[in-house]
């Protein structure tokens, strides 16, 4: 939900209500001020739900303090009415409130200052509307483990990428490696802290559009959160409504939509200095929202650019700060409301990141140094185009969405030591170039019941088609001649050209096609005043096939022929993913729920040449898990305390595991099972209207249920990245002065965990401290910050490559300033 800024003339009221207003509606046009009649169809129901319906039908963003709606009902409003008159009618049974409008058109409903209840509202925290169940609802009413951060909250924390906010969510492990090659696991559901050979265990979405492919988890973009409406983090399998990509959970960006009511804009600029870096980093961002036809048509354009300073020196190529990085992003959204009941939204997004060298430092060298024969640059691009239509049918709403996505990566790796033995260590540089290009098409339609009755339902169908091309190759000048001189005696004359045509001595290409068809549904029945039963399921039909080829010297030495075409592997699977929850809500201040849910992910091909000496399967099957959890959401009546607690148990079977065979080629197989047990806890305390403390704690015990002797892994081995403890604490102070001072101090701790199943590589066991302070004058804000205050060397991922232990570290201490201006 988008936050809002109260104008200077209201600062006395804002001082009491700071950070307390709960946003209850999506972006839309402002309330009509010209007396134009709007056709309303709002039934008698709880006031909070009635205001949601009003916001959608009037096309307005509404923010309301929760004590205004708590326990209140609204009368039915039907027929053509002036928007302001309709709102007054809805509130006629709610005395003691004030309705006002910000310069941007947001309608704010709050307790009148003379009302004693206004003192209680000073302790309220943001209530965020989420779509975790693909319908709009209050975050705290969802019977499941859902966390969300609004755009305002992300902005105040200075969050721009995964590492800035996922590390604050209990139950989430972000293995921060390199953009596009970092991985995310939820509740320990992962067998690697690197890239899965198959589908990722955590789904990433932008406006419900999947970014995870059916095969190979590389290339997930770390999109900038500037002008995002919110980010939802769904813990536990989301196979019922989101499908195969969400085995462990899902992360869903909700980008801000164009506002048809008012012009708005924001400009942001900043500079930062990272300890040890020779040059500073920069960022420039901007947003403009323009109504083209008042209340009917608008466009919103966003652009972001960041240049992050490098902090690792590559002494092998004599390059300082070799891992510098640039990111660029652009987004264009169009909102068209041809009638009051129809809304059509279009979104186009482009995001690109590029770094000059890898982010690993070598453990054998001094602090933050690495040594390779050549730089290892990486480039990633993402492009999305989508069109969505929403139609209010009165008794239900129909949503149809189509999307096309394209992603690509280009990675150069120093393989001089890896391939050098084949050439008697003669070449001084041997690069391996790996590329990846994927295209995905999605179409989904769903019908959602209207109103807030005792029975709610949702039904839908979706189809997702993906194609992935993954070529890789290695070459150097004179490779064919060198192979001829070294191998003609053992493999015959002309071996150089056979094994290295045009000096390319290693050539590999893989194409994977995947499809997922599904029908899904969910229904909730309030069978007693405090009890609600929800059940849902997803029938799915998946198919995957691949074609591959490989050639070169390594293929010749492994198979006896310089060319190989592994047998094509086609696989299909059908199944059902159920979900059942029971919610008990005796009051507005307490909810207890139980949940059972199931998730799965695609199987896939092992596209490597067969080797009789080292047998390996041609493909691997899907894996699945069942999640059991009980949760409590509680608050004190004055909202000074908020507590969310969840206990979960996960039974994971047929685990997909990457295995390296004797000739150093890797394949995946389904081996073993695991059980993950944990607790997630989030607590917010507001001792005064100006001060807030938020803490999250995650405890996790994730281990294999059986031994894997072939891999040298014992029963009870901890899963990679499954830190037993994760803590996050944030202290926020907001002053009541004219310049709106704000201070934020935060702390994060991640305990020790293995980086591999064998436990020989370790990561974690570090603390991070951040400080931020800002002042605001009118629409301009100046902010200063220090990240990683103690300059900790926290290891986020460890890898062994070429016989060298390599570490990914958290960014060293960074000091910066940022200026934003809203207009």
Image (cartoon, helix red, strand yellow):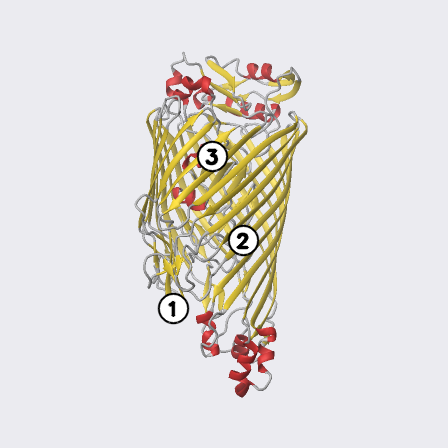
Badge 2 element: strand
Q: Which mark is residue 150?
A: 3
Q: Earlier in the sequence, mark 3 or mark 1?
A: 3
- Do labels 2 and 3 touch, CB within 8 Å? no
Give the vertical position of 335 relative to 204 (above or below): above
Residue that protrudes farthest toward the right in the picture: 338
Displayed quadrant of residue 703: bottom left
Give the vertical position of 427 relative to 324 (above or below): below
Badge 3 element: strand
> In the image, what residue occupies the spot 39% across and 52% down?
311
Which is more foreground, mark 2 or mark 3? 2
Displayed quadrant of residue 689: top left
Give the vertical position of 671 relative to 394 (above or below): below
Q: Which mark is residue 803?
A: 1
Would you name the residue on which mark 2 appears?
Answer: 380
Cα separation, mark 1 vs mark 2, equals 27 Å
Q: Earlier in the sequence, mark 1 or mark 2?
A: 2
- Binning the other alpha carbons within 10 Å of mark 1 as few (below 14), some (14 to 19) or many (20 upward) gives few
- Do labels 1 and 2 touch, CB within 8 Å? no
Rendering coords of residue 678 (x, y %): 36, 47
- Binning the other alpha carbons within 10 Å of mark 3 as few (below 14), some (14 to 19) or many (20 upward) gives many
């Amino acid at each position: 939900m988008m936050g809002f800024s109260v104008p200077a003339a209201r600062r006395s009221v804002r001082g009491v209500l700071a950070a307390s207003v709960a946003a209850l509606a999506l972006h839309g046009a402002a309330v009509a001020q010209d007396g134009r009649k709007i056709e309303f169809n709002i039934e008698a129901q709880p006031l909070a739900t009635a205001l949601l319906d009003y916001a959608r039908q009037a096309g307005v963003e509404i923010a309301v303090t929760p004590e205004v709606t708590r326990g209140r009902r609204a009368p039915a409003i039907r027929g053509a009415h002036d928007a302001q008159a309709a709102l007054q009618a809805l509130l006629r049974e709610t005395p003691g409130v004030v309705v006002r409008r910000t310069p941007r058109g947001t309608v704010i409903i709050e307790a009148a200052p003379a009302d004693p209840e206004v003192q209680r509202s000073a302790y309220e925290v943001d209530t965020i509307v989420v779509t975790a169940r693909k319908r709009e609802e209050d975050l705290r009413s969802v019977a499941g483990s859902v966390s969300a951060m609004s755009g305002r909250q992300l902005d105040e924390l200075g969050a721009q990428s995964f590492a800035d906010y996922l590390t604050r969510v209990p139950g989430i492990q972000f293995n921060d490696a390199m953009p596009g090659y970092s991985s995310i696991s939820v509740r320990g559901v992962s067998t690697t802290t690197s890239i899965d050979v198959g589908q990722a265990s955590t789904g990433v979405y932008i406006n419900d559009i999947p970014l995870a492919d059916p095969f190979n988890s590389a290339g997930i973009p770390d999109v900038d959160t500037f002008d995002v409406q919110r980010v939802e983090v769904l813990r536990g399998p989301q196979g019922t409504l989101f499908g195969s990509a969400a085995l462990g959970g899902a992360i869903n960006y909700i980008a801000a939509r164009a506002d048809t009511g008012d012009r708005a804009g924001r400009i942001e600029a900043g500079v930062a200095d990272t300890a040890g870096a020779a040059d500073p980093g920069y960022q420039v961002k901007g947003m403009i929202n323009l109504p083209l036809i008042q209340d009917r048509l608008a466009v919103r354009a966003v652009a972001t650019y960041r240049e992050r300073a490098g902090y690792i020196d590559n002494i092998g190529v004599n390059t300082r700060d070799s891992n510098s990085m640039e990111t660029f992003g652009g987004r264009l959204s169009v909102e068209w409301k041809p009638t009051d009941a129809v809304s059509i939204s279009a979104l186009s997004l482009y995001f690109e990141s590029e770094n000059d060298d890898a982010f690993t430092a070598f453990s054998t060298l001094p602090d933050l140094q690495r040594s390779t024969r050549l730089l290892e640059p990486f480039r990633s691009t993402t492009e999305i185009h989508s069109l969505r239509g929403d139609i209010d049918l009165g008794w239900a709403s129909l949503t149809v969405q189509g999307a096309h996505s394209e992603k690509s990566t280009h990675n150069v790796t120093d393989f001089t030591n890896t391939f050098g033995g084949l050439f008697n260590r003669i070449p001084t540089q041997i690069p391996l170039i790996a590329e990846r290009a994927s295209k995905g098409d999605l179409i989904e339609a769903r019908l959602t019941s209207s109103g807030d009755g005792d029975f709610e339902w949702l039904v839908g169908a979706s189809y997702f088609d993906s194609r992935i091309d993954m070529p890789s190759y290695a070459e150097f000048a004179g490779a064919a001649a060198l192979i001829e001189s070294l191998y003609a005696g053992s493999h015959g004359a002309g071996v150089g050209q056979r094994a290295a045509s045009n000096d390319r001595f290693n050539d590999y290409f893989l194409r994977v096609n995947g499809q997922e068809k599904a029908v899904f549904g969910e229904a909730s029945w309030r069978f007693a005043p405090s009890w609600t039963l929800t059940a849902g399921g997803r029938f799915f039909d998946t198919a995957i096939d691949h074609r591959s080829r490989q050639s070169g010297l390594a293929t010749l030495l492994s198979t006896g022929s310089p060319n190989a075409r592994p047998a094509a592997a086609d696989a299909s699977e059908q199944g059902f993913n159920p979900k059942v929850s029971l919610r008990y809500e005796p009051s507005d201040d307490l909810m207890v729920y139980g949940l059972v849910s199931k998730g799965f992910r695609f199987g896939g091909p092992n596209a490597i040449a067969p080797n009789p000496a080292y047998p390996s399967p041609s493909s691997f099957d899907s894996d699945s898990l069942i999640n059991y959890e009980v949760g409590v959401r509680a608050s004190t009546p004055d909202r000074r305390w908020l507590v969310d607690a969840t206990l979960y148990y996960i039974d994971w079977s047929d685990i997909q595991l990457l295995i390296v065979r004797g000739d150093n080629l890797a394949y995946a197989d389904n081996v073993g099972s695991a059980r993950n047990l944990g607790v997630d806890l989030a607590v917010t305390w507001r001792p005064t209207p100006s001060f807030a403390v938020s803490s999250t704690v995650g405890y996790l015990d994730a281990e294999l249920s059986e031994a894997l002797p072939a891999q040298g892994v014992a029963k009870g081995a901890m899963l990679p990245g499954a830190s037993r403890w994760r803590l996050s604490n944030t202290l926020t102070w907001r002053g009541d002065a004219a310049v709106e001072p704000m201070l934020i101090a935060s702390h994060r701790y991640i305990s020790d965990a293995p980086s591999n199943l064998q436990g020989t590589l370790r990561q974690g066991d570090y603390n991070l401290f951040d400080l931020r302070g800002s002042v605001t004058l009118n629409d301009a804000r100046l902010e200063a910050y220090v990240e990683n205050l103690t300059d900790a060397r926290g290891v986020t991922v460890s890898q062994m490559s070429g016989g060298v232990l390599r570490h990914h570290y958290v960014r060293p201490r960074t000091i910066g300033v940022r200026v934003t201006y809203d207009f």
